[in-house]
Image (cartoon, rainbow, N blue to C red):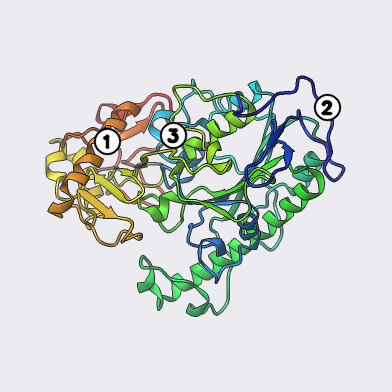
Amino acid sequence: MYRNLIILFGAFAFSFFGCKTSQTSKKTNDFKNTKIDISQPNIIFYLADDQDIYDYGCYGNEKVNTSAVDRLAKEGMLFTNAFTAQAICAPSRSQLFTGKYPVKNGCFANHTATRPTIESVTSKMKKLGYEVVLAGKSHVKPSSVYQWDKEWQPVPKENVPRDYIPLDSIEAYFKTTTKPFCMFITSKYPHGKYFDVENPKAEDVKFYPFDNHKKDDVNYLKSRAGYYRSIEEDNIQIEEVLKFVDAHLDENTLFIYSADHGVSGKFTVKDIGLKVPFVVRWPKVIKPNSKSNQLIHYTDVLPTFMEIAGGKSTEDMDGSSFLPLLEGKNVEINQYVYGVRTNQNILNSEVFPSRMIRNKRYKYIRNFNALEVVEQNLTGKPNVDYFLKRGANAFKDEPFEELYDLQNDPFEQHNLAKTSELESIKESLREAMFSWMKSQGDILDESIGNMPIITPKGKKGFKLDQDTPRRNIPDSIKNTLNKDDYIIINHW
């Protein structure tokens, strides 16, 4: 049950600014000696698509317009160490909705499905009395796992590159709902295709160590300017949603903003891909303009929602509730967070899987098919080994092991894996990572020479030996792989 909360049996109406509320109760807040109804708040999670944490005013980029998110940060709490485990759309979202890391929940390659036996947010929150709504982009399956009470698709809009969130449906729902709800508003912005910005200037873009060398790259500058403009378009959508919230809902509304992963580190396990913006507003509960440096993770979101709703997470879930942080308690939620990289999907055929473990300061990465170990991974089957070599050579600059001191090197520019003074730190992280991998039922392990190629069960899905819009396979290799060459992921 929600800590320090006295439940009043029966529901009654209490109004802020003439608005309806859900089942009620009172709590004294730490930073103000006032009382506020915080039983079963309405929960709104706004999720942007493919936006770097470094591209917000509240995270230090003064050259991009994110005034709506900046406002939320001033009115609530900004997290500086929030993470997803995979820097691609479907695996990132599946963690939010299940409280489980990608390999455990089954969605660890893009455009693949969650295990059909998993109970997701739709079931968990319904049992606690909530209506669960998806407004916008889905990108998760199967429908048997994600049974939304209401689901509204993105809507076309003229003169913009992407569909809009269903603003009319969202406002109508806010006006008429009579029970507590958990709504995910999932934007298609700023994901490309971007706006076409004429005559972009380098001085209008903020550069970082990972892209500073591209200041004179005309194509990159054009793309970056369009990306900034798409961020600004999403800001318009967020402002509209906040207007609806302020007009139609009371102060017992928890509002979270995040983006599913960073675009500059997409498909990687670098922080530029896995570290996400995370801003939370909950009037009278969260102290305005506050900040948390504690490690939190997308797998923590559902356990947090369940505790707020009056329940508790189940033992099979990976995440932990970060409700204490929202209440102003500076306590550790996670000692480590983890990351997964899978380069085999419907578009790519580079066999180059990676796993990552990170604490507040140090980060360890293993690239299991790095060029320096690829010969030990070969199987003796020419058609299979072609793809193993292809993967290793596609990422020839990425070593077998990586270690970063994030306190002194936040952009991961200096690999310290061979620094003898840090050997004990590397060993400790490596041991903890492989223990976690085993608990997840990972297809990889610590041994060299275990380099599976994967495919979904059945005829649909991705086959490495076929052309896609992003890959061309030599004729001599096409259609040479059979099911015995793959690990078949049965639930896909």
Q: Are marks 1 and 2 in contact (CB under 8 Å)?
A: no
Closer to viewer: mark 3 or mark 1: 1
Nearest the viewer among 284 and 251 is 284
Q: Which residue is mark 1?
A: 432
Q: Amino acid at mark 1?
A: Ala
Nearest the viewer among 260 and 1 is 1
Closer to viewer: mark 3 or mark 2: 2
Q: Are marks 3 and 1 in contact (CB under 8 Å)?
A: no
Q: Earlier in the sequence, mark 3 or mark 1?
A: 3
Please name the residue shown 52% across and 41% down the image: 329
Place of residue 110 in the rendered image (x, y in percent of width and height, measured from the top left)? 44, 41
Closer to viewer: mark 1 or mark 2: 2
Query: Is disc 1 placed on a helix, strand or loop?
Result: helix
Compared to 414, does 35 lie above or below?
above
Q: CA distance from mark 3 to mark 2?
A: 42 Å
Q: Which residue is mark 2?
A: 12
Q: Amino acid at mark 2?
A: Phe
Q: Earlier in the sequence, mark 3 or mark 2?
A: 2
Query: Is disc 2 placed on a helix, strand or loop?
Result: loop
Q: Earlier in the sequence, mark 1 or mark 2?
A: 2
Please name the residue shown 46% across and 42% down the image: 296
Q: CA distance from mark 1 to mark 2?
A: 49 Å
Q: Quadrant of the C terminus?
A: top left
Q: Residue furthest right?
A: 18
Place of residue 236 in the rendered image (x, y in percent of width and height, measured from the top left)? 69, 60
Does residue 150 show up? no
Place of residue 380 in the rendered image (x, y in percent of width and height, measured from the top left)? 12, 36
Q: Which residue is mark 3?
A: 107
Residue 354 falls in which quadrant of the image?
top left
Q: Amino acid at mark 3?
A: Cys
Compared to 88, does 480 lie above or below?
above
